[in-house]
Image (cartoon, rainbow, N blue to C red):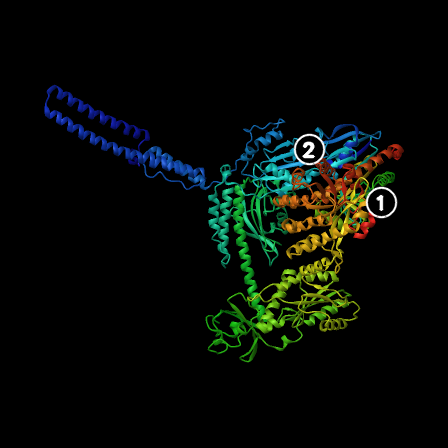
Amino acid sequence: MIVVIGASNDDILYFENVLTEKKEIMVLNQYRAMQGTMFNQELIVVGGCYSSVLTSVILTNILDHNYVDLIICVGKCIAVNKEIKTGDIVISRRIIDANVDLSLFTNVVTGQIPSLHTDFDVQKDILEYLIKGMSRRSFVTLHLVNMLTSDNMSYDMMEHLKSHTSLFGIEDELIALDYNSSGMAVAATLKGVPFISIKVAEVKIDQKNNLNTYLNVLERYIDLGKAVVSTIDDIGRNDILEARK
Amino acid sequence: MDNKKQKERNLLSTYKFFIIIPIVILATILGIAIVMIVWYAITSMRWLLIATAVFAGIALGGYIFAYFIIIKYMKKVFYDQLFSTTLYNIKHIDNNISDLQSYGETSIKEIKQLEDATEAIKQKLDSSFLVIKEPDFSRLSLEYVNKDKKLITFKSFRKNLNNIIFQSQSFRNVIIEVFYKMPRDFTLTNQDKDRILNLYFKAFEEIRNALFMFSDDNRSLIIYLPVIDSFSAIKERLEILVTDSSVMIRDSSGVRHIPAQYAVVAYPYSTEDMILGDLQYAKRQNKPYNLFLPNRIVNEKREHLVMNTTMNLNYTSKIMEILNRLDYSSIDNEKNLVILRDVFNALSNLMNVDDVGVITYDEVEDKYYLYEKCERGKMFVDEDISKNFIEVLEKAADEDQTYYFSHRKNANYALQREIDLRGITSGDYYIIKSMDNERVVAIVYLFNRGGNLMLNSYLREMFLVVCLRIESYFEKKEIADYADIKDDQNENILALSNMFAYRINNDFVVLDTSRNFRKIFPHVKPGQFCYKEFFGCDKPCKDCPLKVHKKKYVNLGRREYEVNTVLNDRKSNEKTVVLKQITRELESGDLFNNNLLVYSYKTLIDTLNNEYLSAGRGYLVLLKVDNYNKFIENEGSGSYEFVMRNYVRNLKNKLGVDDIYFYNPTTLALHLPYLGHADVINTIEKIYPLSKEHCLESRDDELMITYLAAGYPHGYSSVDDYMRHISDFYHSQDYVKDRDFIYFSDFSISRSADKRAFIISVLESEFSGNNFASMNMQPIVKVKDRHILGAEVLLRINDTHRNVFFNAAEISRIAAQENMTHLITESTINFVGTLYKEYGKNTFKTNDFNRIAINIDETYILNPALVKKVTDLVTENKLPKEFVSAEIPEDLINKYKDKVGALVKQLSASKIMLSCDRFTGNYADPDTLKELGIQELKIARDIIMKIDRDPVVYEELKKTVKHAKELHMNIAAVGVENETQFKLLRDLDEDMVVQGYFLYKPLTRSDLIAAIVSYQQ
């Protein structure tokens, strides 16, 4: 089974629509999810994953009740580097929890949760398949990025993150910001499930989002959806998830 | 006390007393009279009869007198005292006015009770505040679709709209339409509807009595909110909701997201009979968020609807009365603070608000602080008022600078964070900005802690009126403070520059003197004659600068002064005379030129040296005044200086041109770094009108300026070389004076600085003779086989100095104003005639080229003689039927409805085909155009450019084309820029003709002929 998670309804609308034999399920009696099949694979599509904490809780619940092969986090994000233009699609090669800094109290680095890795790397095979799928199905520019997750998306915090990327050792690399990927990474790592985050850059870090920026993102959601669906098809045919089995 | 109690009477007993006593008296009188009559009947004593008659007369007279007294007493008690006073009081109570009448001295118990009750009400009203009545729709015949009475049918909403608005008219009520631009065959599915409905139920759950309904076409959700606080909060909320509102459709082009769009209208901006129409108008703007708030004047007949209000305007006038006592010029600021405190106390009591006050900005400290507040207000200390807080308040404010949030939840999200920090739960505030609109100078606020604040629109208007008055106080105060500071600054500048000033009237009486003047000449007092006190003359000086308009040099004491009048406003009766002390320092090496108030020549050289050091590029333009002699000869040097200073001031203030230098007494130098020659021309075009502005009474004060431009470095190795080159150019005879022309030193470009004159000269040169260089033609192509069947004549005049094409509309407008349209028309007509003569019988005929389209603009409609020229063209050249096609824009057809009919008739009679250009359907429908005699619709570029991106536009075009074909009208499309658009149009109608860059750009005559021939080959 593959799980697709997103925050808003529009993040996951495409996936809900392409599911077959679908039925509605409730996670934790509160969060609406859709279960169905796609290319002979079972899929759960769940929305409402605002904040890394909630994402972690929702996913843990799903992982407890299902045998999941892959988790894909979709939606929109904020571009930090000027190389990433709005409307570009970014794929996480590494996810960092920017909520956490316990370095004063324990022997960890900034962004590291004690007992877990300093950051969360995406499995290479998944990455390759997704990039292949994207290049085949879409002309949109792709970027492999470090996905920084913060539950505080205020402008002050974004400025703080922008100026402190050196703390995470990624100041020279491509960076995007979102508010749920690290929740997925933590839950998936603890359960040993591969994961990836693939998002559309809505705005630059110093730009304010509005209706127009959102509508640009919406146009890209179809490209993103098609690429992810195509990858799911490839994954199904190539059975690449052997590593886990 | 006991005596008083004994005297007190009961109203009922009084009533009984006054009814029974007259009856008893009357009965007694009648009884006695009857007895006496009976006695007379028995005894027949004559005196008894007389006695009976006298008794009856006296008794009845007494009775009538007593009855009159009783009636008078009863009128006093029941009418004057009880009815009139009660009626007066009821009316006042109804209007919430505490000024109630007393029942006066009375001994009646019930009236005393009324008096006590009235006194109690009076006390309550004095300490009352207003409570707002919420709307109640329960008595309306709304058809509810769901159990919780939120979802209703749109039909019943429309039917009850007037009553719904009437119920909640005291508030801003808003109708939001969440609409989806879907292709024709799609509507919202039941699943979509459930999801969207739940989403918006939840989003507006705190707004009581909100109504929701789906439109009849099932493509939109309509939400009625009876009470909203601010438009910015609604917009913010909708912007967030949009991310959960999209629906997905699957059609031949694949799967697509259809995002929600919003149309928002509000009462009372829209009236109840127009609000749904306005909603449709808002939708047509077709942006993601379409707010439409028309500002119509409300018909007074509807006033009766507005009377149902808890508001009383007396409160406003009472508060305004206090505010009128504010004195901005008062040195005693404490007095103003007390007045403001009184007003805030009144507002706080009236609206039951915890804190009312005003925050203001301290420019010196660069921080905001609490200026004044009501007595019970304890919400803020100055430390709470951070700049960030003020910024958030400013950002949230609506367009009228107010912002109201009745609950914490209704506030904008950024504001919620700030008010949480300060414990504010509801409020209303008004932002006062500085006169330049750059900075918040004050905020008048009403803030509650721990409760909601319900204000209807009348209370909000009242608050706004009070705030506007406070704003005008701050504005006047700012002006007064500014004037004080400026006054000080002016005095200081005068002192620093060794200048003294005094004002006199036309009779040379001293009105006022500058501060430093008073120190030097303490004996000169206002009211004295200047010529007497300064110069010891008995009559005005012969060489007075005010009379001769020339500077005057005088020795006063040990010092020499230059007397001039450069600070004068010539239109004023008061004259300012300036005495400038002459010293060596002022004459040499200054950074500024003191006479013209521009940078000196030395500064110009320094600036250019810096430019050369930093490898800069740019231009220096010399503004050489050709007619300076006129000023010197007629009015003296003072007048020339005055005009030039005015010119320089305008350059600085109106156009922001600041790099102005002194070159020589008749020439200024304008430094334009980083500009190329085309930019220089643009700049000069902009500054040219300033040289023609009048500042003298004579109005003969226009400057004739020759603009000499020279670029740097342009091969000049040093500033010396460059300045030598400029000097040579300046003194050469390579240019003609007195023409307001621009000349460049490095290349032979010269043209008028006046854009209008330049365009006129271009028109004259372009259209004199039949060279037709400016006539281009864009092929009209059949969409079916790409065959060129005609061409549209387009005016393409190149501005060779800047290498751009002139805007055709601007050319037409100037030509019309200068009566030169005939040149263009004749040239166009000659062009078409010549073209037909040369190619009509051969190339055109063999290649089936059968149409030349010309544009009909406003000038044709207003000038029938031009139309005659077009019709003559057809007759004289024997052009085939409909070879000439006249294109009239849709907006002009609408604008000149009454004139277009005659024009069309005249053109049709000459076998000219009529086409409606730039057709959008916004101004006219195909039926009307057909009736007018229009034979073709030429679809506007704006529509064609969207058809490949927006299926809705394509669908609408499809409908228009279908409709036009039913009316047997031809269809043309312009602005086809890619293959997709071309194919879509071909799919729509194979008979259509098209124009566009995808097929052909506008071509010269020879290129057009080549294109026609090459197509055939």
Q: Mark on residue B219?
A: 2
Q: How many marks?
A: 2
- Report the residue that reaches farthest toward the bottom: B558
Q: Nearer the viewer, residue B372 or B553?
A: B553
Q: CA distance from mark 2 to mark 1?
A: 50 Å
User: Mark 1 highlights which residue?
Assistant: B1016
User: Residue B288 appears at what percent x and percent y?
Assistant: 69, 41
B164 sits to left or right of B617: left
Task: Using the image as rendered, state which of residue B271 and residue B705 is in the foreground.
Answer: B705
Q: Position of residue B456 (x, y in %)?
A: 54, 40
Residues marked 2 and 1, same chain: yes
Label 1 secondary element = helix
Q: Looking at the image, which is closer to me, B332 or B989?
A: B989
Q: Is any part of residue A192 visible from this angle?
A: no
Q: Is residue B664 left or right of residue B486?
A: right
Dot 2, how many residues are within 10 Å of its Cα: few (below 14), some (14-19), or many (20+)?
some
The amino acid sitting under disc 2 is: Arg
Element class at badge 2: loop
Work out whether mark 2 precedes mark 1 in sequence or the reverse, and give the earlier one: 2
Q: Residue B631 placed where, x, y %?
A: 60, 71
Image location of residue A197, percent across then percent down = 80, 40
- Judging from the image, mark 2 belongs to the subunit labelled B
Q: Quadrant of the N terminus of chain B?
A: top left
